[in-house]
């Protein structure tokens, strides 16, 4: 029997434990992209290097909420912790999704007042830590400052940390 498609429900956004910034229309979670190098020769080949490019995220809120400005003001402090709580639905079952982003807001785009249009406030975040838990199972745990990179349960930088720390 074929499964039905997974559908995202609204995602609630919380900042620094202060409170709910609002419901997100869309969340672009960090893309995990490895560095590559092209090897020349008779047959060129792109080689993937186990180093991760800088990460960023984008959140579109359906509210004009002052807490979004609080998140942006933390740029010169310790940064901001953004918690994204939501769920997907498939075959009548709800699956919890929890993403935690640490970093600094690099762009805050206030809504353009347009009569009769839904409010959209956008935050772009330079991400320094990222955790993703789906159905209570950790999928990703990346912490740039502490050289931690666990993806799918595999600690990619364990040996590297042992050599340099």
Image (cartoon, grey):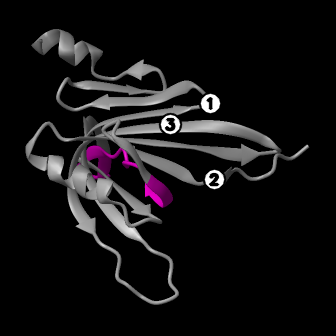
Determine the residue positioned at 28% across, 70% down: 109
Q: Residues within 10 Å of mark 1 (few under 14, many from 20)?
A: few
User: CA–CA distance between discs 2 and 1?
Assistant: 14 Å
33 relative position to 26: left or right = left
Find residue 52 and report its horizontal and vertical position in percent: 26, 40
Q: Earlier in the sequence, mark 1 or mark 3?
A: 3
Does residue 110 appear anywhere in the picture? yes
Which residue lies under the disc numbered 1? 135
Mark nearest the camera among 2 and 1 is 2
Tell me the quadrant of the picture where the N terminus can be found. top right
Say which element carries label 1. Answer: loop
Find residue 116 and report its horizontal and vertical position in percent: 52, 87
Is 79 or 52 nearer to us in this picture? 79
Residue 9's disc number: 2
Tell me the quadrant of the picture where the C terminus can be found. top left
**Image: magenta residue range:** 22-46
User: CA–CA distance between discs 1 and 3?
Assistant: 9 Å
4 relative position to 54: left or right = right
Query: In this figure, what is the number of numbered marks?
Result: 3
Q: Residues within 10 Å of mark 2 (few under 14, many from 20)?
A: some
Q: Residues within 10 Å of mark 3 (few under 14, many from 20)?
A: some
The dominant secondary structure in magenta is strand
Which residue lies under the disc numbered 3? 98
Find residue 68 and report its horizontal and vertical position in percent: 30, 56
């Amino acid at each position: 029997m074929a499964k039905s498609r997974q559908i995202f429900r609204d995602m609630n956004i919380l900042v620094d434990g202060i409170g709910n910034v609002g419901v997100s229309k869309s969340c672009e979670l960090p893309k995990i992209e490895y560095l590559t190098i092209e090897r020349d020769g008779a047959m060129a080949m792109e080689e993937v290097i186990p180093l991760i490019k800088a990460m960023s995220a984008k959140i579109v809120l359906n509210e004009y909420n002052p807490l979004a400005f609080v998140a942006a003001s933390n740029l010169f402090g310790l940064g901001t912790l953004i918690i994204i709580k939501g769920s997907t639905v498939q075959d009548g079952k709800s699956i919890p999704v929890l993403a935690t982003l640490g970093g600094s807001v690099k762009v805050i785009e206030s809504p353009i007042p347009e009569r009769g249009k839904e409010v959209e406030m956008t935050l772009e975040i330079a991400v320094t830590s990222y955790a993703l838990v789906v159905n209570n199972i950790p999928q990703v745990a990346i912490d740039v400052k502490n050289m931690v990179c666990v993806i799918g349960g595999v600690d990619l930088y364990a040996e590297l940390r042992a050599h340099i720390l």
